[in-house]
Amino acid sequence: MQTIEIKCDIKDINLAPQGQKQIDWAFKDMPVLKEIRERFIKEQPFKGLRLSACVHVTKETAALCTVMQAGGADAILVASNPLSTQDDVAAALVKNYNMPVYAVAGESVEQYQRHIEEAINHNPDIIIDDGCDMVSMIHDKRPDLIGKIIGSTEETTTGIIRLKALEKQGKLGFPAVGVNTSLTKHLYDNRYGTGQSSFDGVMRAANILVAGKTVVVSGYGWCGKGVALRAKALGANVIVCEVDPLKALEAAMEGYRVMPIAKAALEGDIFLAVTGDKHVVDVQHLLTMKDGAFVGNVGHFDWEINVNGLKSHTKEIKQIRPNLEEYVLDNGKSVYVLCQGRLVNLIAAEGHPASVMDMSFANQALGIEFLVKNKGKLENKLYTLPYEVDEKIAHLKLKSMGIEIDTLTPEQEEYLNSWKI
């Protein structure tokens, strides 16, 4: 690796020019975040504060981190997934923004852990997390830092599950904002972003036709709804697997077939897990699948599909394409695994489009601002940003799209606030 002024661990600093083009391209479709950046430049809300961000290193997250830096934060960025880094973007952040970045596409799990440790060693005041790995490591291995940390924001459903567990056990050491619970995040990013980017990843990885195939979606939260919706739009027959009776009922009302994964395993051609849980597609399901079934993960961690367990029943693993492996099983069948069981939409494709991440990362930026402005006033618990923040982001997004909406008349407002007819 080249010797450069900023301490970092990236693939190649010479990739910076292309990475800068990527960041600029993302910003063109992120008008809400750009407006927040202009205010942050003037107000400097994070001046003197250290920010550690553990997120997927993409052009969109780069835009977020540069906005935080523009607001005065001393920022460091590390990857929240060993395979999702866009190396050219990492190089641009180091060279053009003097931002330390520790992220290399294809890094080992050990290297990934070391990178998170580098972010922790940055001695952060504020944290942006994606999956709760950094916050978990601080609570587990560096509790000495907890008293200094103002708070953290969390991007994903998976991370929020972990934060809720910390809070429930009384172990959460500082306030956290669950960005994923904001309406302008999960209603749009999770549903439309995940739905589109997941099949973008599947088709780039395998170049298969979705129409006419049976797609099994495990999990019918907002991400699962988006995946099922896009599968249906592409002409697939969709099966939903759920443990929540209300979500299962909703899926049935939407016209999807609903059944346990053990039954769906016998019928599916393409399986996508979208739950945030462990081994939802387990070895016994993988072994009963059709010969030539495809399995992929859209959850944050790589254990939704028990790929490691499948290896004990595998005679040979063939690398068919860069993000497609054929597991030749001892029962005579083959299963095709996408992206080693890691996030298909961020590894085989580029993640969500910038236009939808504009709203998600507006929530991230305003979530950090909320924590800083309320330093010392918040309990050590998981918060959702006030509804007014969601409304503001939605108004800015509509304005950028050239969409106008109605306004209540004084008479209508009075009527809605009265119990009289």
Image (tube, rainbow, N blue to C red):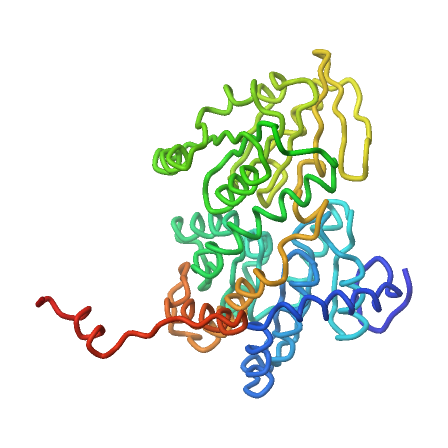
Numbered label tally: 0
Q: Looking at the image, which residue sits at the far right?
A: 2
**In the drawing, does residue 308 fall left or right of residue 273?**
right
Closer to the camera, 306 or 61?
Answer: 61
Q: Is residue 130 visible?
A: yes
Q: Nearer the viewer, residue 22 or 370?
A: 22
Q: Is residue 288 above or below residue 259?
A: above
Query: With respect to residue 20, does 318 lie above or below?
Result: above
Q: Is residue 46 above or below residue 177?
A: below
**Farthest residue, direction top:** 331
Residue for point 38% across, 65% down: 379
Q: Position of residue 202 (x, y in %)?
A: 68, 39
Q: 331 or 9: nearer the eye?
A: 331
Please name the residue shown 67% across and 49% down the image: 346
Could you say where residue 35 lies in the image, as x and y percent from the top left?
Answer: 56, 78
Left or right? Give the position of 7 relative to 203.
right
Tell whether 410 sits left or right of 90.
left
Q: Residue reaching furthest bottom?
A: 42
Image coords of residue 419 (percent x, y): 10, 66
Q: Position of residue 90 (x, y in %)?
A: 76, 63
The residue sitting at 41% across, 53% down in the picture is 167
Quarter where residue 183 is shown: bottom left
Please, is residue 190 above or below residue 218 in the view? Answer: below
Q: Quadrant of the C terminus?
A: bottom left
| Quadrant in the picture for the N terminus | bottom right
Which residue is situated farthest in the left direction here?
420
